[in-house]
Image (tube, rainbow, N blue to C red):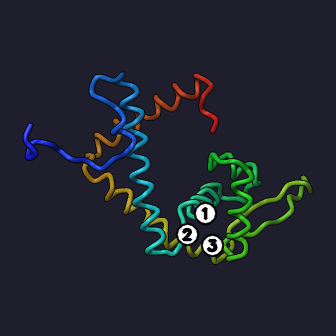
Amino acid sequence: MGSDQIQLRAADRETAAQEGDHLKLRLWLRALTCIQMIETAIRARLRAEFDTTLPRFDVLAQLDAAKSPLTMGELSARLMVTSGSVTGLVDSMETDDLVERKTHPADRRSTLISMTQRGRALFDRMAPVHAGWVDELMAELSPAEAATLHGLLGRLKHSVSAAGMGEP
């Protein structure tokens, strides 16, 4: 094979798979690679445009979606990370006046996390830009292909959950 026929591609998780490998293994590696590529692009853009991180965006997005304050446990579950990871993140976001903690009125041992006005203003600026980036990164998928992939990934999510392996 001549050098002009060799296709070079950046090393990623998928490069570990060979054409003859189990199809579902290759599928898993391709999905993981796609997610990592999207996350890398989004992380870089959030840093460049908003001087923030993906985890901070994710916290604000979950608080926005909840429409009410969340406990640390609820926030951890929604983010699919340990409560220890969320504690440090919320600490720094509280210092930057993006979120606030309040004692849970029904359970004094529990803390509720909510967005501050500053956090809300930042999220309201970031959310539509973030959505545009996701659209751009997935631009080669037609609406029908995106809907099909969404449905298939829903089935995969159900399969993983049914196997008892869906917990982070």
Position of residue 50 measured from the top left corner of the image (x, y, whole percent): 49, 75
Q: Tag 1's secondary structure?
A: helix
Q: Nearer the viewer, residue 149 or 65?
A: 149
Residue at 56%, 63% (x, y): give it: 57
Residue highlighted by disc 2: 123
Label 2, secondary structure: give it. helix
Say few, some or many: other residues with alpha carbon within 10 Å of mark 2 (under 14 / 14 to 19 / 20 or more): many
Contact check, label 2 and label 1, Cβ < 8 Å: yes
In the rendered view, tell whether residue 52 sits above or below residue 157. below
Q: In the rendering, which numbered label is found on residue 60?
A: 1
Structural distance between the alpha carbons of marks 2 and 1: 6 Å
Who comes first in sequence, dot 1 or dot 3?
A: 1
Left or right for 150, reference 9:
right
Q: Position of residue 147 (x, y in %)?
A: 35, 40
Kindly identify the amino acid type of the residue bearing the numbered disc 1.
Leu
Of mark 2 and mark 1, the one earlier in the sequence is 1
Q: Which mark is residue 136?
A: none
> Which amino acid type corresponds to the residue marked 2 in the rendered image?
Phe
- Say which quadrant the N terminus sits in: top left
Asked where in the image residue 86 lies, by quadrant, the reply is bottom right
- Labels 1 & 3 near each other (Cβ < 8 A): yes
Circle 3 packing at 10 Å, graded few (<14), some (14-19), many (20+), is many
Amino acid carrying mark 3 in the image: Gly
Picture quarter containing residue 26? top left
Find residue 140 and report its horizontal and vertical position in percent.
25, 50
In whole angstroms, how far apart are the C-alphas of marks 1 and 3? Answer: 7 Å
Name the disc covering residue 119, or none: 3
Closer-to-camera residue (103/144): 103
Tell me if label 3 and label 2 are in contact, CB under 8 Å.
yes
